[in-house]
Amino acid sequence: MISRILKIKGLSKTPNELNKKVCIFGQGFVGLPLALSFALRGCDVIGVDVDDVLVANTNKGITHHTERFHGLTIQKILQMQLEEGRYIATTDAARVVSECNNIIVTVGIPIINGNFIMDYLEECSRVIGKNLKKNDLVVIRSTVIPGTTDQFILPILEEESGLKAGIDFYLAYVSERIAEGSAFSEFENMPTVVGAINNESLTRAIDLIGVVCKAKIITASSMSEVETSKVFENIQRDVNIAMSQEFARFTEALGIDIFEVIKLANTHKRVSLLMPGAGVGGYCIPNAYYYLEPKAKELGLKMDLLKLAREKNAFIPEFIVNKTEELLNQVGKELKGSKVAVLGLAMKNFSNDDRISPAVDICKILIKKGVIVSAFDPMVTTQYEFKAKTQDEALDGADAVLVLTKQQEIHFDDVMHIVEVMNENPICVDAKASINRKEALKYGLM
Ligand SMILES: NC(=O)c1ccc[n+]([C@@H]2O[C@H](COP(=O)([O-])OP(=O)(O)OC[C@H]3O[C@@H](n4cnc5c(N)ncnc54)[C@H](O)[C@@H]3O)[C@@H](O)[C@H]2O)c1
């Protein structure tokens, strides 16, 4: 039993009267492992989501997430917590809020064409407000536009409930800092930053977070500081990657290896360059600039450097398509009508997440340009017409291979075989430095 395993390792914590019942809005990449993390420590947890298929599957123990904890898959942990009766998912938000005194929100703000969509967070805030009771604690963990908790969520909660924040109910903001794939251990071991509407809310929020988080819990002077620090954390990665991309163009022109150069630079104790790749994807980093921009506009500020970094990163898929065309032309082939094998569709290495994935964008641009695309990524469950069932099926007769994300199931050790399966005079764009360059040239992969 996982609960026994946790006890043995000294991880299990007995929740107190106040933090025993927890409900978590949003059962996605953050919400589900967070809910299970509370359940693992003995809380009674209800996961709330508007997606009824997701809820039905979750209650059957089915999830496509790839998280692991103490050698157990998230599927195994989910099944155990369902069996032990400490976790259940539901779409009945109203009932859950009326039965729970700790409410955590992990519902996001999507960005569409650079515009933020508040609908999901608003709907969720309204149902919480309508069913809120005296002394309930509401903790917002979504990544938001600075000021959202205080200026958007709080008024809805007060209006719908008729209660006063900080007096009748408690309100706090906690930034979510996990990386997908390490969620369970990062909920536990990542220092957690919290801000609240008043001291009582802060104390309640720290008590609740402390059930799962063993690391330092850092208190901020307000919720806005925490919201802003979270957006800054994400944007610094966006800017850092844009810089590495520009460095990559320089090293390419010079004929030296960017990955080696970055590794060398990072041996300096105060340097931490990120690796360039096929672009920046996922829900967090590409959206971050668009969480800051509306507030900056409101304040009459321009964020030129940050905007440029975002634009540079957003252009990388197009750059990779142009590079593919250039290399194909060099071997006397046209982009249009060629077959391109894409290896890796996830937004980052070893992930199943293909939200805002540059690899998917690259496939779509290629298809628009008349290319036959065949992509292989067994971790990504989304159905795409251009998906192949095996690596060899994707490579079969291809004029070009694009290596865009690493996965355990994608193999590069046998370069000779890759070349044999492909068409004559094949070319390669390797955004992950996965294929041995010397071997590739030896077998004629340009
Ligand atoms: N994924 C990450 O690694 C990560 C890391 C740090 C922070 N975040 C932030 O955490 C938040 C959640 O991200 P995610 O990756 O889990 O997103 P997700 O899309 O995987 O999950 C969000 C879930 O919320 C549900 N939802 C939408 N409206 C709802 C409502 N009214 N009530 C209940 N559920 C509702 C959706 O159906 C979805 O299942 C976002 O703000 C994101 O920016 C994510």
Image (cartoon, grey):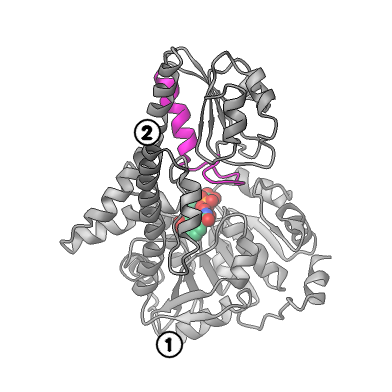
**Which secondary structure, mark 1?**
helix
Pointer 2 or 1: first along the chain? 1
Q: Mark 2 highlights which residue?
A: 319
Count of marks placed on residues: 2
Residue in view at x 42 percent, y 77 percent:
195
- Residue type marked 2: Phe
Where's the N terminus, which quadrant?
A: bottom right
Q: Residues within 10 Å of mark 1 (few under 14, many from 20)?
A: some
Q: Is residue 319 magenta?
A: no
Disc 1 residue lies near ligand 1 with CB under 8 A: no
Q: Magenta part of the protein: which range?
A: 346-369
Can you give x and y, in whole percent of width and height, for residue 336 in the image?
Answer: 42, 14
Using the rendered view, name the quadrant where residue 22 is placed.
bottom right
Residue in view at x 57 percent, y 59 percent:
31
Can you give x and y, in whole percent of width and height, for residue 264 in the image?
Answer: 49, 56
Q: Is residue 48 left or right of residue 64?
A: left
**Which secondary structure, mark 2?**
helix
| Disc sitting over residue 326 in the figure | none
**Pick the front one: 258 or 391:** 258
Instruction: Tell me: residue 109, above or below residue 431.
Output: below
Q: Mark 1 highlights which residue?
A: 199
- Residue type marked 1: Asn
